[in-house]
Amino acid sequence: MTIPGTRLQVMWNRLLAVVEEQGQALIRAAFSPIVRECGDISAGIFDFHGRMLAQAVTGTPGHINTMAEAVRTLRGRFPLQDMKPGDIFMTNDPWIASGHLNDFLLMMPVFYKGKVVGFTSCTSHLVDLGGLGMGPEGADIYDEGLLIPPCKLVDQGQVNTLLLGIVKANSREPVANEGDIYALIACCEAGANRLADMMAEFGIDDLDALSDHIINTSRRGTLDAIADLPKGTWRNVLKVDGYDAEIELHAALTIAEDHVLLDFTGTAGCTNKGINVPLNYAAAYSVFALRCLIGPDIPNNAGSLDPFRVTAPKGCILNAQPPAPVAMRHTLGQMTPDLVFGCLSQAMPDTVPAEGASCMYDLPLRHVPEAVDRGDQQFALELVFNGGTGARPGLDGLSATAFPSGVWGSQIETTEAVAPVLFHRRELRMDSGGAGRRRGGLGQHIEMSSSLDQDFMVFLSVERILNPARGRMGGQDGAAGRIRIGQNGNDLPGKGEIRVKAGETLVFETPGGGGFGRPRDRAESDIKRDIDGGFVSAKAARALYGYQP
């Protein structure tokens, strides 16, 4: 049966609504604040062949774009003829799912009229899976927690209680983990039910015609966008803080007639700390950066992703091989958009933003080891804070904004309700945005302490402490990140474990974004507005812009 193009488009729009409802089911049912409050998830619908047709708007590129490949992998691991209604498969293998153990990826076959017509899938972050926990200190993947190979989590509607028991037994937060797993299951089921309802409403027995329309239309649109770009190869090097020594990330971006190739050859090798990045995760953020500027109005699916290719030598820090430690893979993985933008800015001058804070300021907290013996409150919690984005060619950067991760900042009230911590201050960090014709976005100033008479541990793995976000086209750099104990304490390195004692205050400052264009070209009205709004001090306005009110 031939389906008219207008009807296919209506069905495509409905599919986007279905998958958004699927994502919201996960967020509303989740237990962990990083999922429920911060949206650290992905949700998607896939066709019979495992090709992604639609993704929820809510979610991170590290989850969404890795999920796009992971479903194809899982589909190939389990015979289609053995799948039954109500089955759900899962894994947290970093090299299949989304780069570290704490992310669970589920895949559910969708049955309609007795046959598999597609799949739903989702990913979310579980706060603790044992081991050394969320920190960069592991020497290999075995230090970092429980690895679950591809397996069946739900068998014809019956949850694998042994597997669930193993997950709970290997966690400091067993109740939250159990709740989050059931939320993931509910997410898959919601998507499957709504997809079946949609097929019944439109009177179709399979997704073949709709799938081909979505993928072919999106691929054509992306290829048209690539065809309009200059052709050639451009290179960039980004220096990052690393763990105990600075590291160089290298990229060569080739724009051809029918594809875009990104190659990380020249990038430093892996370290013995958990900041290594599986290639699936590095590719997810790199391709996201490319798609922000190449066909950004085209929905994200298998068709629009197909023309982008990412390669890297095995063993480099952006293509870590098992059993490398990867717990904090986002630390460098989320720096790859700035690496890619450095290439694109040469090919597409005046269209690419300046560098930003990029790496989210992830703040895993946990009780100290002796808390169990002392009877202190035990907890494991992961907070997320964001810095400023780079200034854009026509607009200032965004302050305290989650780019590229998309993970919303942790809420103070929620955090204080679930863990023994107290926030004393949280505000935008004046003068942290790089000066320029367009100003970089501001970072944050945060102060927190224990709310009880007990110490707590912090597991740091952040960037932009030593290498701030660079400006572009004459713009100045943003302010570097800064971490210390107390206002007058010594600056701490961006990676490693620290103990915050009872009565001490952790002072946490996220980086600002770089400026775009020469500061002297900034409009006087914009400078005045910055001063009035508390974004720039009068002293800095005089020094950086020569502003005299």
Image (cartoon, helix red, strand yellow):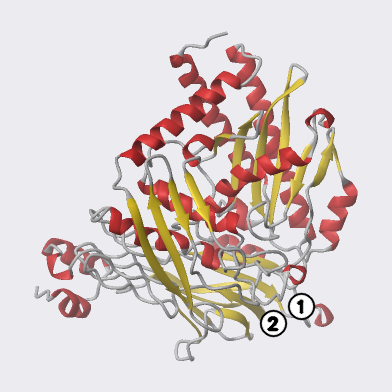
Residue 301 vertical placement versus 8 (above, below):
below
Residue 246 at x, y = what percent? 49, 80
Residue 67 vs 546, above or below: the answer is above
Residue at image point 66% right, 45% down: 70
Q: In this view, does 156 lie above or below 514?
A: above
Q: Earlier along the polypeptide chain: callout 2 or callout 1?
A: 1
- Locate the N terminus by quadrant: top right
**Considering the numbered disc 2 on the image, is that residue within a helix, a strand or a loop?**
loop
Residue drawn at point x = 44 percent, y = 63 percent: 251
Please name the amino acid that badge 2 sits on.
Answer: Gln
Residue at the outermost top position: 1
Q: Position of residue 474 (x, y in %)?
A: 21, 69
Q: Are marks 2 and 1 in contact (CB under 8 Å)?
A: yes
Quarter of the image where the C terminus is located: bottom left
Percent from the top left, x then y, of residue 498?
Answer: 62, 83
Q: Label 1 amino acid?
A: Asp
Q: Mark 2 points at which residue?
A: 454
Left/right placement of residue 270 relative to residue 91 reads: left
Identify which residue is drawn at 43% across, 76% down. Answer: 481
Q: Which residue lies furthest to the left in this view?
A: 548
Q: Is 72 displayed left or right of 351 in the figure?
A: right
Residue 389 visible in the snapshot: no
Cα gap from disc 2 to disc 1, whole angstroms: 7 Å
Instruction: Name the residue that disc number 1 marks.
Output: 376
In the image: residue 424, left or right of residue 139: left
Q: What element carries label 1?
A: loop
